[in-house]
Image (cartoon, rainbow, N blue to C red):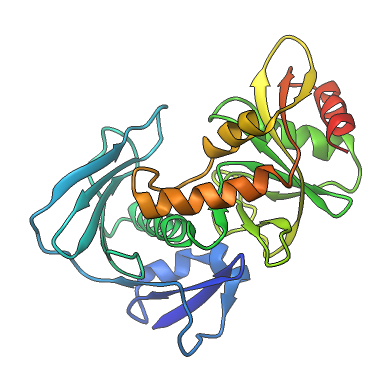
Amino acid sequence: MKKAYEVAGHIFTVEMPDRYPLWGLMGQYDPFEIPCPDGGEIFSLEWVPELPETEKTPVYTEVPEEEGQSRIELYRTATGWRFEMAPTAKARTCCWMEATEDYTQAKLAILPERRSALFGLNNALMILYAFRTASLHTLEMHSSVVMKEGKGYMFLGKSGTGKSTHSRQWLETFPGTELLNDDNPVIRVTADGGVRVYGTPWSGKTPCYKQLNVPVGAIVRIRQSPENRATRLNLIEAYASVYSSCSGLKAERQIADGLHATLEQVVTTVPCFVLDCRPDHEAAEVCYEAVR
C-alpha cells in the first residue's frame, strides 16, 4: 500500500505492506494525507524487512545534548547515504535507512517494537523532508508556533529554554491565540516573496498536527532571564539565530547553499527578536508589544 502526504505544499509518499501494524500508529499524518498523485512527489520512502550490511564511511553523528534525545549516525555509501538511528544516546540502533544521493528515494528497516517503529518512521521522514527541501525555499525548524490575528509567531531556543512554556503563556494571556505546532513547523518562502509557517505531522511531545499555514509575523529567540525584555536583532544576529534552529546537513554544500538562500530571504523579510524572560504572563505581554 502506498499513501501520499502534503506538508507545506511538498508531497511525499510512504509505502508499506497493506496490513503492516505501523499504518495503525500514523494518526498524526491523517490531516496531511492526499490522494496518491501520478508523480510529482519530492521523495518516496519504502519499508523493507531489512537492509543488508554495506561498505560505509562515517560522515556525521548527532550526539544528544540532553537525556532522552535521539542519536542519528550518517554514513556515505557507494550509492548514496545510510542513516542509523536510536531513541537515546545509549539505546541500541533500531532504525536503518538508505537514501539515494539526492534523497528522492529511500528504504527503511525498523525493529518491530511499537515505540521503535513510530520513532523510526518519524525521524526518517523528517530527515528526508529537511534534506530534500533545503533547496526548495523551505526550512524545517525547531520551534514552537502560535497563531494570533492571522499571523504566526515563532519561538526558538534550545530544548528546555521555555519555547513551549512561552507559547502556553500566549494561549492563556491573549484570547483567540491558537497553537500551530510545538516543535517542528516548516517555513516556506512563497513565489511572491512572502514567508509563511506551516503545521506538520511532527510536533514533539505535544500532539498538535494541523494542516494550516499563516504569514510569519515575527521570529523570537527565548532566553531565560530574571527580567522580561525584548530586543530586535540586526540582520547578522537574526541570521545566526534562525540558522541555529533550522534542520539540514549543513556540512553538505548543496544543502548549505539552499539553506543560506532561504535564510537570507527570511531574515530580510521577517522581524527577529530575542526575548530575555521569566516564565510568566508578563513575558508574553512584553513579547506581544514588541512583535506587533
Image point 82% across, 29% down: which residue? 287
Quadrant of the rendered image containing residue 61: top left
Q: Position of residue 205 (x, y in %)?
A: 55, 43
Q: Position of residue 7 (x, y in %)?
A: 58, 66
**In the current view of this chain or complex, which residue is farthest to the top?**
226
* Image-based side of 253 in relation to 184, left or right: left
Q: Is residue 268 above or below residue 83?
A: above
Could you tell me which quadrant the C terminus lies in? top right
* Nearer to the camera, 4 or 99: 99
Could you tell me which quadrant the N terminus lies in? bottom left
Q: Position of residue 91 (x, y in %)?
A: 26, 38
Q: Position of residue 211 (x, y in %)?
A: 67, 65
* Nearer to the camera, 96 or 94: 96
Q: Is residue 220 above or below residue 216?
A: above
* Image-based side of 161 in relation to 153, left or right: left
Count of number-bearing discs: 0
Image point 41% across, 53% down: which residue? 255
* Image-based side of 187 in relation to 288, left or right: left
Q: Is residue 270 above or below residue 64?
A: below
